Structures are given as structure tokens and as C-alpha cells.
Image (cartoon, rainbow, N blue to C red):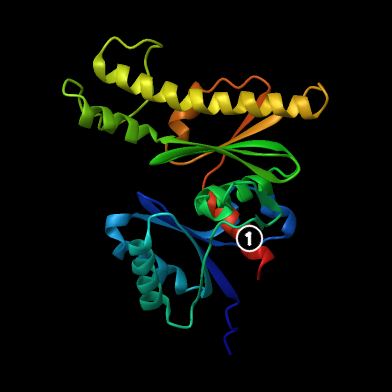
Amino acid sequence: MENAKSPSMLLIDAGNTRVKWAVPASVPEAALTSACAARWLHTGSAERAALAELAQQWAAAAESLNLSRVVISNVAGPGLRDALDALLRQSLGDALRIEWFASQPECAGLRNRYRNPAQLGCDRFAAAIGARALFPAQDLIVATCGTATTVDAVSADGRFLGGMILPGLGTMATSLALTTAQLPQIHEIGALSAPFADNTVDAIVAGCIAAQAGAIERAVATQLALSVKQAGGVAAQVRCVLAGGAGAIVAPYLTLPGAQLEKVDNLVLIGLHTVAMQTD
């Protein structure tokens, strides 16, 4: 007789532009600090406008798995929440246990110091939890470069201190085209060929990249100064954890003296996995 499949969980990061998902592998506890692809049995994504693709992806994954639990971070509003709920039940059955992750005063060893903890975007809180799981007991700056760019500070003793939100790389470029008559729409952002642009398109790209990098560098410098002060003037170390689709574009332009840069894919999903493992 064929052995029953062990229950598996599905993790979903529903953002403003894309919906990303993963099924975590059953790995030893020590391996959970790894950001490598071996963490996941299956991964996938789809544009928000093409959610039907998700049903096909989940159905393919479900053929070899017993998906019984779903943990979701959704920052794209109640409409997407309802659509995902219906799609999940249609694809995987009504018996599915669906959990909607929300920011709270404390979770997975991270204390939320937002003035109103529930107001903190659940993706930001999940990303911070994921970064802390990967790099415990360290001062962190967690920068996620997507539709919006968020840059958040986490202390070595486990406090989410707060952060900043700015338009993402693509959003910045688009806003210039929409609000300025003489500037073109930028359809693709790539590497710069010179430090100072000699044409308008590259000048827009250079300005947007500089704004992203500058915000991250400023946050790192501020966190580093706080760390030194709290250590009584002793030299400190800050780790900058960079995630998001535009992170790879921004990374080469970052100058982070006194800090170490870590590029991590699917940081929100890593955070959701960390929470799920502690609340099973």
C-alpha cells in the first residue's frame, strides 16, 4: 500500500504587483538559517492580473504533496484576499487551513515597536522576522525593494524599531513620466554606464537608483551610530539585508562602510515559515 503523504504547508506573499509562493522543505532546524534554494520544495509566482496561473501551479505542487495549511501575508487589500481565499479552496479543497498573517506586538521573538503595532505592514514585519531568523542577535537594516521600497531597523536584542517607506525604483521612474511633461516613460531599468548620465533616460535611472541607495545607506549609518552609542563607543557591526525584485539593481551602487550586505530572495516567505514553525 502506498504511504500517506506527510502534511505540507503553502506560504504566500501577496504583494501589490506579484503573488509569490513556496512550499518549504522538511529540513533540520539548523538548516532553517539558510537562504539557499534548498529551503523550498516548490516555488512560483504570478502577476496579480493573472491569478489563474496560481491555480495551475498549486495543482502541480499538490500532486506530490499533502497541502493542508496555508500561511499568507497580503498587503494588497480585501479584494485580493477574497480572490486568493476562493482560489485556494477551489484548487486545494475546503478543508484547507488558511491563516492570514498580521502584525502584532510580538511574534517569533521580535517585539514590534510601532506606535500602533497592527498598523505595520504585515510584509514588513514578516521580512524583519525572516531577516532575524537568518541573522539572529545582530543589528539589522532590512531593505525590500519592490513597488515600494521599505527600509527597516531591527536591533540585536529583538526589537523592530521602525523604518521608512519610499516609492520603489520603477514607481519613481513612472511618477516622473506621469507628472512631468518633458520626461519620458522608462520601460526598463538596468545598469548605468557612467556615474553621471549624458542623456535624459539614463539621468532618470541614475537619479532613481541614487535615491534608493541613499535611503538605504542613510538607514545603515543611523543604525550603526545607534549601535556604537549603545555599546558605549565600542565599534559595532550592522548587517544590511536586501530583498525584493529591484534589490539586485540597487545592490551594486550601495556603499556601506561598517556594514555587511546580504542579498536574500523571498525574505517575506522565510519570515512566514519562521512564524509557522513556531505556531504549528
Front position in the image: 2 or 112: 112
How busy is the neighbourhood of tag 1: few (under 14 within 10 Å), some, or many (20 plus)?
Answer: many
233 sits to left or right of 49: right
Q: x and y percent of residue 181 in the render?
A: 16, 23
180 sits to left or right of 189: left
Most extreme residue toward the front is 115
Q: x and y percent of residue 248 in the render?
A: 46, 33
Q: x and y percent of residue 172 in the render?
A: 34, 31
Residue at (63, 60) in percent of width and height: 275
Residue at disc 1, secondary structure: helix
Front position in the image: 99 or 41: 99
Q: x and y percent of residue 264 in the render?
A: 56, 41
Vertical relation: 126 (above or below) 147: below
- Give the residue pinned by disc 1: 275
Residue at (50, 50) in percent of width and height: 121
Q: Is residue 35 visible?
A: no
Front position in the image: 35 or 216: 216
Quadrant the N terminus occupies: bottom right
Q: Is residue 162 visible?
A: yes
Residue at (81, 21) in percent of width and height: 233
Most extreme residue toward the bottom is 1
Vertical relation: 166 (above or below) 91: above
Vertical relation: 125 (above or below) 54: above
Name the residue type under label 1. Val
193 sits to left or right of 273: left
Vertical relation: 50 (above or below) 199: below
